[in-house]
Amino acid sequence: MMMNGSIKYVDGKEMIGEGVGFERIRRITGYLVGTLDRFNDAKRAEVNERVKHTVSREVQL
Amino acid sequence: MIQTIVKRDGRCVLFDIEKIANAIFKAAQALGGNDYETARELAEQVVAEMERQGNENPSVEQIQDTVERILINTGHARTAKEYILYRAQRTRVRDMNTRLMKTYEDLTYKSALENDVKRENANIDGDTAMGTMLKYGSEGAKQFYHMFVLNPAHSKAHLEGDIHIHDLDFLTLTTTCCQIDIEKLFKGGFCTGHGFLREPNDIQSYAALACIAIQSNQNDQHGGQSIPNFDYGMAHGVAKTYRKNYIRNISKGLTLFADLEDGDQAAKELNARVEQESGLKPVMADDNGYRDRELPELCKLVDEQTALKIQKFAVKEALKETKRGTYQAMEALVHNLNTMHSRAGAQIPFSSINYGTDTSPEGRLVMESIMKATDAGLGNGETAIFPIQIFKVKEGVSFNPGDPNYDLFKLACRVSAKRLFPNFSFLDAPFNLQYYRPGRPETEIAYMGCRTRVIGNNYDPSHEIVNGRGNLSFTSINLPRIAIRSKGDVDFFFEELDRKMDLVFDQLMERYQIQAKKRVRNFPFLMGQGIWLDSDNLGPDDEVGEVLKHGTLSVGFIGLAETLKALIGEHHGESEYAQNLGLEIIGHMRKRVDEQGKKTGMNFSLVATPAEGLSGRFVRIDRKLFGVMEGITDHEFYTNSFHIPVYFNISASEKIRLEAPYHALTNGGHISYIELDGDPLKNLDAFEQVVRYMKECGIGYGSINHPVDRDPVCGYTGIIDEVCPRCGRREGEAVSVDKLRELGVWHENAGNCGYCGDIHEEAARIPNPVD
């Protein structure tokens, strides 16, 4: 997995995390595959275009 | 006078007329000709013709053109045709070799970031040595099959994008996947090929061996591995663990109160006597009267009051230890399945586990533990990506308040709302319920995590079960292309669809014929250890063709939405008319598949193709052929199977209602997703309502998507837009260590790895001390 980078001193303050991205886990075709950066181009595009589905009252059971 | 010629690679070599004569002679020979002299004369005419044109240093291509012309002009039309065919074939081979080398070059010098081929399947790390090695093999194998193994019609259809033969690199090697009956496997122990493993004796070994079984089988097949009866299988391990813990705690009590030299020995002997005489064992439910039978034996060593006290202590302690042991075992299983490797180290085994219906205390503990371990996450709180977990929803068992496993259903919703797993399978959907026989877990539908479904059985209707079976291979049809070519003519669409289906039926059967010739020794675990149904009756040199008939041959499809758009201008989310046509199309495919099954006795099935690598392939080719067409080829991907397009605005209930009928038609597998907004943990009711609605509408297998982001620096897991809600940093930015200290997420001993588990989350975990 991703390393968190090493401590760097900025103005005498210990800083960490430079260059470290966020991990984004998404479902791909029924399974998870770890972070988005491992998706192929088409699947990445698909994830980007996904819209949310509203849960309306009618779902109430 | 021609002295030299220019070869294709630009080199200049000495001219040899015999080479031309030989090529002509070979073409004539293929037609039964046997006259070298004529070939030689024709070759001389070729040379004369070239010299007449003043070409003193011709290229190979120019010579070949002249040979063709001379052959035709001199009345050797059939030889000319043969020569042209031979030439085309050589060109094809040369092109393929060049293409393969280009592919190899990209694999070698480009990182996965730049090279889409390396990211075809996200769970293979294409940047590692073994991952790249696997890709070399895979790409080379594909070229070989296209050139020498596949029926040219099938190869052409695949290359041109009419159909997609999945896992083509494994064409001659193995089959897709298997549902491992873990109960049967463990009975009496098994062999992984390098030594025998005895029948496990406690839950920790059960869990460890389950991982090994998945790993071993994964190496015998090209798809994933699923355990359909995880709760039932693991429950045996819990029962054994409880019994051992109970006896050990009796021993502690005896050591303390009876002043025995060897309490262990006494407790073991006492237990053996009681078990032998009563046929009862200490069980977690503590409801079988074992203790009543044990009491008089204990009273021989201590007074009755003390005996009762020892029993009470043993029950309490055994339960506590069993719970802890089971949690640890499940935690280890999740960790193992996310770290262990298969396939030359390139891939984490693709594992799925199904559970939900075992109502025994042991089975329930297994489920509670695996879900809590999943909830807790991996070492630094990361979301586990394997095993894919599928919770079986069944009325009267795990669905309604009052059902024995309703609490576990609630837990499943909560864990899924945080970790995306479990997914939910619905045993009451009519097409699943038809196989269900109470008390026979092998008749409960199970899904491969990706969505594959295997239960019906044309070949052997007495075995309509999930255990020991799986998919053999599958091939998908490019539905949108047929629709585009139909230009609105629906009748033509169905005719062309039939032709494509016939092609795929043939191709699947030809692939099966190759698979059928394999022998048990080619699958040391899958067949050698009797995992596959009926393979336990075969010897190492027996062919597997007959038992493989328990598996499915699946026809898949992609892009129903784009298909409808091309045919009538609307997809099934946009009008009821489109929905009806969609159901007609998929219904027709199912009918054809069923007929083919009846005709051949093979398990042909219709699958809503998962399409990871395929999602972009067809549309890329089709855009080249037909240009950008709105709602059809204007995205980077074709919409998955029968799904409503991901970019279409629709309510959750409407999406579920529209997609559910396709689940009934796709007997080879299906899944529907709902994308929830916000953090579903904050709205668990909505989450559960969606699952309940799926069940009511007849969905077979479904799951709910929501973003799971994580900041590896401070360890926050949840939704992260631009800024991490915990530490306030943006992607790529640094954050001060003081800030992390303040938040209580900085571990001084972590050196420069920073975050090492959330202290607050740690505290909430089930304690995990080492004894």
Image (cartoon, rainbow, N blue to C red):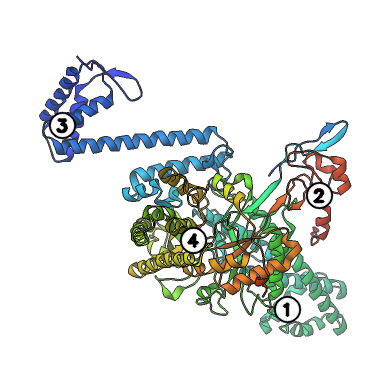
Examine the rendered structure and indicate whether residue B270 appears above or below residue B624. below
Q: Are marks 4 and 2 on the same chain?
A: yes
Crowding near the residue tagged with mark 4, few <14, some 14–19, many ≥20 C-alpha atoms within 10 Å: many
Both marks 1 and 3 on one chain = yes
Q: Which mark is residue B266?
A: none
Near mark 2 (Cα within 10 A), the count class, few <14, some 14-19 or many ≥20, is some
Count of numbered labels shown in the rendering: 4
Q: Nearer the viewer, residue B660 or B653?
A: B653
- Residue at 71% from the left image edge and 63% from the top image edge: B415
First reached walking from the N terminus: tag 4 or tag 1 = 1
| Amino acid type at image mark 1 | Ala
Amino acid type at mark 2 = Arg
For label 1, the SS is loop
Of residues A13 and B515, the one nearer the viewer is: A13
Q: Mark 3 near mark 4, Cβ–Cβ under 8 Å? A: no
Q: Position of residue B629 (x, y in %)?
A: 47, 48
Measuring 84% from the left and 32% from the top, which residue is drawn there? A9
According to the image, label 4 marks what residue? B608
Q: CA distance from mark 3 to mark 4?
A: 52 Å
Chain holding disc 2:
B
Question: Mark 1 sits on what residue?
Answer: B285
Does the image show residue B324?
yes
Which mark is first along the chain, 4 or 3? 3
Inter-mark Cα distance, 2 to 3: 80 Å
